[in-house]
Image (cartoon, grey):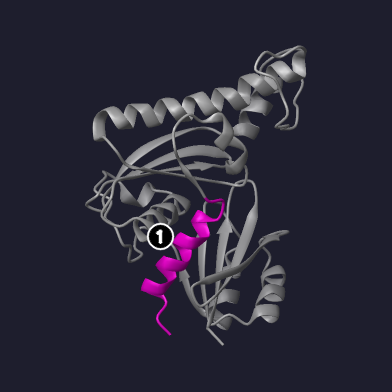
Amino acid sequence: MEPVTLCIDLGNTRYKYAIFEGATQKLTGILSDDQPATMQAVLNEWKPAKSILSSVVEHDPTLEETLARATKFHKLSHLTILPFTSPVGKPETIGADRLALCAAAVNLAPGKNNLVIALGTCITYNFINKYHEFIGGGISPGMDMRFKSLETFTAKLPVIKEDWNFPLIGYDTRTNILSGVILGMAKEIDGFIDAYLERYGNFNVLLTGGNSAYFVPHLKNQIFADPDLLFKGLYAISECNNQV
């Protein structure tokens, strides 16, 4: 049996994990919280030899102790051995999730320019050039944040849930918001891709995040969508840093 690796992503909206047997991703799951007992249940079920944690939140510090006792553990940070460099002013400020996405891009398409677009709490644009340098990108509000901001900063607009069945021209408040937010995000993404094309020519565009597949029909540019790209990056980084 191939060794099991546990990859954990503590994001602003969800806490998730993935199980790899060797290099094969077997499943993904949701963690209800960041408490050690919750993680211990996953450890007891899968008995991983290695684990890696990507966190962009202030998680329970004893979670790391739980992982370190049971596995060969690595916490992703700017001190991690990475398959790319980050020649930016303050590399310690780069989010762990963005580091994992860049590692996935380099692992999937080495020696090429890659733009990784992640649709989460925020939209992040992450550009890694053909020399395997992460040179930066952009951050803008994600879908839920846009929905909530319309309700928060207006007197009468409601907060609504995403729905992928909507017209270009909205016929009521709800469909106007759906069209404005979702198509607005699609046009933003296409605009960024076009701007990068003007500067760098051809490159790979990788789209990820739980709702990424729903955006593909609304984009004019050719992309590769993979909702689990971050986990694949975490696994690749774990292989570099968690030698058993």
Find the magenta span and give its range. Answer: 226-244
Q: In the rendering, at what x and y percent does residue 66 appear?
A: 60, 75
Looking at the picture, how far across and down is residue 152, in whole percent? 69, 22
Looking at the image, residue 89 lies above or below residue 1:
above
For residue 87, side relative to residue 11 (left or right) = left
Residue appearing at x 35%, y 52% in the figure:
92
* Residue 3 is one of the magenta-drawn residues: no
Q: Indicate the position of residue 83 as horizontal and vertical percent values.
A: 31, 62
Q: Secondary structure at mark 1?
A: loop
Q: Amino acid at mark 1?
A: Ser
Work out whether residue 114 or residue 43 is closer to the camera in this orientation and state it.
Answer: 114
What residue did someone put label 1 on? 77
Residue 154 in which image quadrant:
top right
In the displayed structure image, the side of residue 208 where residue 93 appears, left or right: left
Residue 5 versus residue 44: which sits nearer the camera? 5
Q: Residue 115: x and y, percent?
A: 37, 42
Rendered position, 133 above or below 136: below
The image quarter containing residue 196 is: top left
Give the left or right position of residue 72, taking residue 194 as reference. Answer: right
Query: Is residue 68 depicted above or below 224 in this figure?
Result: below
